Amino acid sequence: MPETHRRADRLSANLSANRYGNRPTMKDVAARAGVGLKTVSRVVNGEPGVTPETERRVQEAIEALGFRRNDSARVLRKGRTASIGLVLEDLADPFYGPLSRAVEEVARAHGALLINGSSAEDPEREQELVLALCARRVDGLVVIPAGDDHRYLEPELKAGVATVFVDRPAGKIDADVVLSDSYGGARDGVAHLIAHGHRRIGFIGDMPRIHTAAERLRGYRAAMEDAGIPVEESWVSLGITDPRRVRRAAEEMLSGPAPVTAVFAGNNRVTVTVIRVLAEQSRQVALVGFDDIELADLLQPGVTVVAQDAAALGRTAAERLFRQLDGSLVVPERIELPTRLITRGSGELPPAD
């Protein structure tokens, strides 16, 4: 056979071997290295009993063939995937960036892969995503819940799937949860506005069924009650954080014969919209937001916020998850992390009238 034909045949064989679905196997590595299948298995899994020279030949064969270990087979043998699932509310929300990164770093330190997804604040989508991750046999779950009934997880928990809830507690089941002190943080933020002379203070928050929104509203009411200030219902607005809804709420509070002189914004998305509304006002209005926002210190005035440590939430939850997996945790606990008031100017403005 001419040499050109032989080269074409070899090229065709290589392309066929590397075609999608035809990944090289340990048998291919063993054949190329001239060793037994058990020897390849020992090298791949870092087991002893292989001479340095044999290990070198196997590693060269692995590199030449582009072999990757099939972890699916390990799952079938050991029942563990060395992976955990993270279910967020919204992957696009800046608050979840450091939280997700912290979970990933802890997972990596334990040799585990992180798989994440977004519920989009939809309880049905949350359930579908959680159960899909369980079907793929993740070892554990970190969940920011969208729903308030998590009994669908009971079979998975009984089967040994470690689970920690973050930011909001689970509904109707007993499970670990790591929270920020939403009540105390909101109470401190509103008390700060009161200390600077404000009495007509508006509150714009998320949907009332959400745990954090309800807790922050409770903190707002507590601070007003502590100061002996009756709350007018026109000062309170809860609902979706869509900018149009938040804008309408802010504009209504800022209009009329007795408008609010300050606004407490219930989360970072609300804060951003309120900043835009306040920029259009002819009078000075104070603002404190719950959650820090990017560039808050560069605005004029800087935005005073009640900051929660998103990275600490993620890290604490992930560390607790792996302690569950190690068998060192049995009784579910509620862990509440403190918030921090950061003063930058907007919350220290005095009433305009």
Image (tube, rainbow, N blue to C red):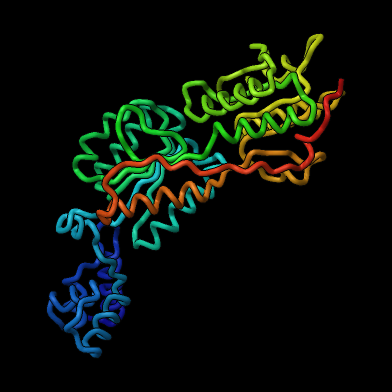
In the rendered image, which quarter is residue 197 located in? top right
x%, y% of residue 327?
25, 54
Q: In the drawing, does residue 310 fall left or right of residue 27?
A: right
Is residue 343 visible from the viewing direction of this image? Answer: yes
Q: Residue at x 61, y 29 (%)?
A: 266
**Nearer to us in this view, 239 or 91:** 239
- Picture coordinates of residue 353, whole percent (x, y): 87, 20
Question: Up-down: is 4 above or below 54?
Answer: above
Tell me the residue at 73%/30% (across/down): 193
Query: In the image, what residue occupies the spot 34% across and 58% down?
Result: 112
Instruction: Residue at 12% x, 79% y: name it.
Output: 36
Q: Judge by depth and name the residue closer to the eye, 20 or 54.
A: 54
Quadrant placement of the N terminus: bottom left
Q: Position of residue 174 (x, y in %)?
A: 30, 34
Expressed as whole percent of the image width and height from the top left, the position of residue 101 reads 49, 53
The answer to whether residue 244 is visible is: no
Q: Answer above or below: position of 67 versus 335.
A: below
Q: Quadrant of residue 23?
A: bottom left
Q: Is residue 239 above or below residue 337?
A: above
Q: Nearer the viewer, residue 350 or 255?
A: 350
* Number of marks in picture: 0
Q: Quadrant of residue 50?
A: bottom left
Q: Is residue 123 left or right of residue 187?
A: left
